[in-house]
Image: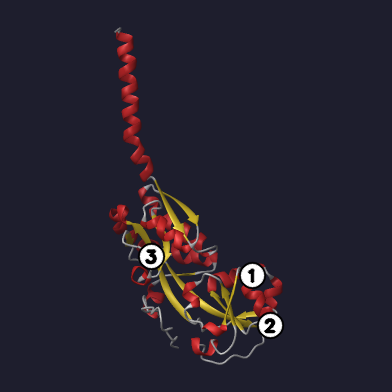
Amino acid sequence: MTRSKIWIILRNINILFLICVSVPVLAADKLVFATHVRPPLSLYLKEVIQESLKPYAIEVKVIEMPGSRVISQVNGGYADGDLSRVINFKDISDADTSNYRLVNEPIVLTEIVMITLAKKEIIRPITWETINQDKVSFLRGSKTIRKYLNIENRVAVSSNTQVLEMVANKRVNSAIMFASVAKNMLNQSPELNSKLMIQSPPVLSFHLFTYLNKKHADLIPKLELSLKQLKDDGFLENTANKYQVTAASAETFSAVSLLQKINHDKPMQHKE
């Protein structure tokens, strides 16, 4: 074998070695998060997580999919993390979440609100008991909302637009929706905005947290530290204002129960 052929073989072996070594490094430079939430909340969450991982030179990709599929993808390790879940998610989920690991720093305050006709007088205080006195529209598949509504009052529809139109057309008494979604939709529809009103205070408020697959457990302390720093420097609040959501902060952390332990069978009454 000539010297030139030996050199070519050694060079190819060296190239192959470098490729093999670099593959896990490249893979670690991007994390794929799955989420069941929709804009504007998903856009806020992506921007916050991307900023929090920037010091570690990690890029973020977000894929939206149905909630049950998110769980299987993250728990199975096909996706690296779940953008947002309640803190007791592993306790209340019927699916296998054994590989989920909590990033113990709240990322957003989620509020569930009641929407009615703009001039409608409602019974106060707003509780699930008062809401359940008449028909209520909500998005089909919203388990968090569904479990608080009596069976005879539930009117499940296929889109958030339909949820609001049911109220505007007086086919139901009210709608229950996540506040960020309701605000975004009313801003985009002058007609619905003129007919409807988001009632306050919210009927339910709770924080959401990010989860990672256990293979990224060593990243959790770093991500928690980054999120705390983003809160301190105002990034979370400024980004939340841009997307019309409510950032998790010291104020919301103390004002709202991190985990009002959600019982599968008995709706929890909102306390004023």
Q: Residue at x 65, y 67 (%)?
A: 188
Q: Residue at x 37, y 72 (%)?
A: 92
| Residue closer to the observer: 49 or 14 | 14
Real-space Cα separation, disc 3 to disc 1, in angstroms: 29 Å
Picture coordinates of residue 263 (x, y %)?
Answer: 38, 80
Q: Residues within 10 Å of mark 3 (few under 14, many from 20)?
A: few
Q: Quadrant of residue 234?
A: bottom left
| Residue at x 64% of width, y 70% of height | 161
Q: Amino acid at mark 1?
A: Thr
Mark 1 Cα-neighbour bin, 10 Å: few <14, some 14–19, many ≥20: some
Provide the secondary structure element on which disc 2 rests: loop
Residue 23: percent from the left, percent from the top? 36, 37
Q: Residue furthest front?
A: 152
Which sits in the foreground, 190 or 21? 21
Q: Which mark is residue 18?
A: none
Q: Residue furthest top?
A: 2
> Do we see residue 48 in this rendering?
no
Tell me if 118 is positioned left or right of 11 in this view: right
Name the residue: 29% across, 58% down.
221
203 to the left or right of 76: right
Residue under label 2, please give it.
170
Amino acid identity at mark 2: Lys
Q: Can you give x and y, in whole percent of width and height, for residue 15 in the image?
A: 35, 25
**Which quadrant holds residue 21?**
top left
**What SS does tag 1 mark?**
helix
Give yes or no for contact between labels 1 and 2 (Cβ–Cβ under 8 Å): no
| Tag nearer the camera, 3 or 1 | 3
Please tell me the numbered disc located at residue 95. 3
Q: Earlier in the sequence, mark 3 or mark 2?
A: 3
Q: Which residue is mark 1?
A: 161
